[in-house]
Image (spheres, helix red, strand yellow):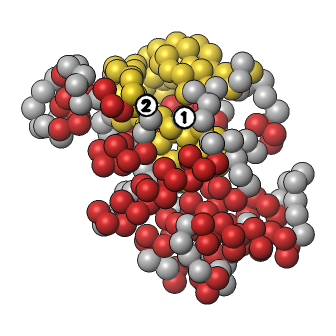
Amino acid sequence: MITLSGVTKSFTTNHVLRGVDLTLASGKSMVIIGGSGTGKSVLLKCILGLVPHDSGSITLDGQDVRRAERDAFLARFGMLFQGGALFDSLRVWENVAFRLMRGATRRPKDEARAIALEKLRRVGLGPQVADLYPGELSGGMQKRVGLARAIAAEPEIIFFDEPTTGLDPIMAGVINDLIREIVVEMGATAMTITHDMSSVRAIADDVAMLHDGRIKWTGPVSEMDACTDPYVQQFIHGRATGPINAIR
Ligand SMILES: Nc1ncnc2c1ncn2[C@@H]1O[C@H](COP(=O)(O)OP(=O)(O)OP(=O)(O)O)[C@@H](O)[C@H]1O
């Protein structure tokens, strides 16, 4: 379980997080929504300890994330980054096996390649893709490779940062379904940042809306439509008018 309590983070006079309280239950899928620039990525980086928070606490299974031994802590996480963030100079399978070939749990090359092929298969990519370079793949295929990489080391917790950005609606649907299936299958705890409401509905058990540096609303996705909070309503219906200023 990941617990955030009163988390604040400022960049000089820009007070991005102003007291975030949030719990990510183990084995559940939490989706964070909120307008551009509200601090969703900063929140994710604070949890990972990549950006130090100013005050409040963030714990993983009761342990302060700032006190955790970095390598062991990060090894518990898988990440699917916004642009896929694949290494252009590495073959697809080497990208997927990246973490398997480094660090304390380093595996022999043949074993790492076999795991990479198995993970590629899991995301619907055949062995013919393994020796290509990322630049030879479509955007949707690159996302799948990124997803295969995120799950390669079988992490307990997976973060998805805008997993469907730049994909057509059909491919976005495929990626959403894959994320949901994989998270359920692995029993992983998932946190996804997205603007895409169809992703929210496909991926989330729970939703949290970040606004003005705080969690404006959180609850099960099944209760989101009935939520009367005007901020949530404006966001989920994509209305230009409402309490959220459209000009930012
Ligand atoms: N390293 C940094 N130094 C200074 N300011 C930063 C830094 N990282 C983020 N910010 C600021 O924090 C605010 C929140 O940024 P963040 O990227 O978390 O937004 P977001 O909600 O993820 O937005 P989007 O949905 O557009 O990706 C922005 O005002 C941004 O300029």
Left/right of residue 110 with respect to residue 167 in the rendered view = right
Identify the residue under disc 2. Answer: 206
Quadrant housing the C terminus? top left
User: Marks 1 and 2, how far apart in space?
Assistant: 8 Å
Where disc 1 sits, the SS reads loop
Q: Is 181 on the left or on the right of 196, as rendered? A: right
Mark 2 surroundings: few (<14), some (14-19) or many (≥20) residues within 10 A: many
Q: Secondary structure at mark 2?
A: strand
Where 137 sits versus 140, above or below? below
> Quick check: marks 1 and 2 in contact, CB under 8 Å?
yes
Percent x, y of residue 158 = 60, 45
> Toward which corner of the image does residue 222 lie, by quadrant?
top left
- Between 55 and 243, the one nearer to me in the picture: 243
At horizontal 36% and vertical 32% (from top left) the residue drawn is 221
Identify which amino acid the numbered label 1 is placed on: Lys
41 vs 46: above or below? below
Q: Earlier in the sequence, mark 1 or mark 2?
A: 1
Q: Position of residue 175 (x, y in %)?
A: 44, 60
Q: Is residue 198 visible?
A: yes
Q: Which residue is mark 1?
A: 28
- Residue at the location (43% across, 71% down)? 139
Q: Could you say which is closer to the camera, residue 236 or residue 34? A: 236
